[in-house]
Amino acid sequence: MLYLSSQVARAMNRLQLLPLLRIGYKLTILNHTFKIPIIENKEGLIYNLGIGEPFLLSVFEQLYKVKSFTFLDAGVNFGQTLLKIKAVQPDVVYIGFEPSGLCSYYTSHLIKVNQFNNAKLIRCALSNKTGVLTLNAQSDGDTRATILENTLTREENVFQELVPVVTLDSLISIITESGKDILLKVDVEGAEWLVFQGATIFIDRFRPVIVFENLPSREDPVKRQQQQAITDFFVAKNFSLYMIDEENKKISAIKKIDNSQEILKTNYLAVPAEKKSSFPILA
């Protein structure tokens, strides 16, 4: 596959030429240049043509200045976070969890063409139990796909696929070993509380630093209860909570997750209290 510069790729995209050709392009992040393949339905073009959530990239940079984490990525999508992490630390051990067939296929290709070392992909969703659930989406490869029921309207929920779900606790023996520093990212379209419920042993044993998304509740009482449940969960485990403010490019200590509306304030950090003094970014 031929790989163009990102500038040429953008120009061809404006002319609607890029999707017609199986041509990839190159994306540079922190002086590291990656090959971005394009597959039949244009995936990779949309999600990796630029650097999404740039402040989150800065957060990863600051965290990795202190420790060389093993990175666990719940909700890989099309490899946006994988590229960020490999830009920050090329040899980092990366393990991604992604239930979508199309997203898994694409990210496996992304790993192969870039010859990423120490990058593994597990095709499953993380939850609070082991089994098989329906992944609900608006299309094949929808990055907002979710294992939660009744999240999408009937009109939106037009694509479903059965996917395996497992707990993080059940994977401890195969994904890492005691003594390793872990950075866990959880971005699973509203199912974060399920992931944490299935990771109680893992969190107690490894005391990871956790970056997670929690979407605005929009005054939905169930979502507000989940925000409180996540707060109580981390407080009970002696973690400190921080809000990552993309708009103002800062990290603020918070007492609880209480976001009903602000879409640019949906990423959070949970840091073990005994480790927070190690990270200047939290000062």
Image: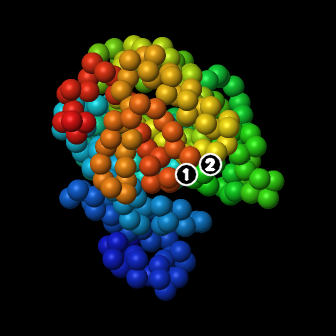
Q: Amino acid at mark 1?
A: Gln
- Relative to 166, 12 lies left or right: left
Residue 241 location, quadrant: top left
Helix, strand or loop at disc 2? loop
Residue 149 position, x and y percent, is 74, 40
Which mark, residue 250?
Answer: none
Q: Amino acid at mark 2?
A: Arg
Report the number of numbered marks.
Answer: 2
Q: Which residue is mark 2?
A: 218
Q: Which residue is mark 1?
A: 261
Residue 205 position, x and y percent, is 39, 13
**Residue at the image point whose x is 66% and y is 55% from the top:** 140
The vertical placement of 105 against 167, above or below, is below
Residue 25 position, x and y percent, is 38, 68
The vertical placement of 60 against 156, above or below, is above
Residue 263 position, x and y percent, is 50, 54
Task: Tell me, yes or no, if residue 50 can be seen here.
Answer: yes
The vertical placement of 271 against 160, above or below, is above
- Relative to 181, 46 lies left or right: right
Residue 100 location, quadrant: top right
Outermost residue, bottom side: 15
The chosen color scheme is: rainbow
Task: Tell me, yes or no, if residue 96 can be seen here.
Answer: no
The vertical placement of 155 against 201, above or below, is below
- Relative to 215, 273 lies left or right: left
- Count residues near mark 2 (Cα–Cα under 10 Å), then give few for <14, some for 14-19, many for 20+: few
**Residue at the image point whose x is 37% and y is 49% from the top:** 245
